[in-house]
Image: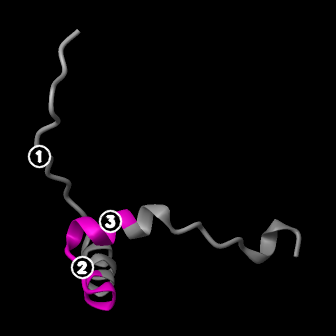
Amino acid sequence: MTDETPGPRTIEVTDDVYDVLKRTTDSRDTDINGALRYLIEVPTPRTAADGD
């Protein structure tokens, strides 16, 4: 088994997704990687349909 370092990846996103990422980078004073880490770690809010 070899230990391979992952290389850079390119992911295409819609303008709406790009807008969320841009607003997150601006509001958190971070780069795109920091915004992605933040958005991945934030729990998804429950909806009213969950029984509330």
Q: Quadrant of the C terminus?
A: bottom right
The residue beneath circle 3 is 36
Mark 3 or mark 1: name the one nearer the start of the chain: 1
Near mark 2 (Cα within 10 A), the count class, few <14, some 14-19 or many ≥20, is some
Q: Residue at x 32, y 65 (%)?
A: 36
Measured from the top left, where is residue 30 in percent x and y?
24, 79
Q: Is residue 8 left or right of residue 36?
A: left
- Circle 3: element type: helix
Mark 1 or mark 2: name the one nearer the start of the chain: 1
Q: Is residue 28 magenta?
A: yes
Looking at the picture, does residue 6 appear above or below residue 20? above
Q: Residue at x 18, y 14 (%)?
A: 2
Measured from the top left, where is residue 39 in percent x and y?
42, 68
Measured from the top left, where is residue 35 in percent x and y?
31, 72
Question: Which region of the structure is painted magenta?
Answer: 25-37
The mark lying in front, picked from 1 and 2, is: 2
**How far is the residue under mark 3 from the one under mark 1?**
15 Å
Looking at the picture, does residue 1 appear above or below residue 20? above
Q: Is residue 32 left or right of residue 41?
A: left
The residue beneath circle 1 is 8
Residue that extends furthest to the front in the rendered view of this protein: 3
Name the amino acid type tagged 2.
Thr
Name the amino acid type tagged 3.
Leu
The residue beneath circle 2 is 30
Mark 3 or mark 2: name the one nearer the start of the chain: 2
Q: Nearer the viewer, residue 49 or 20?
A: 20
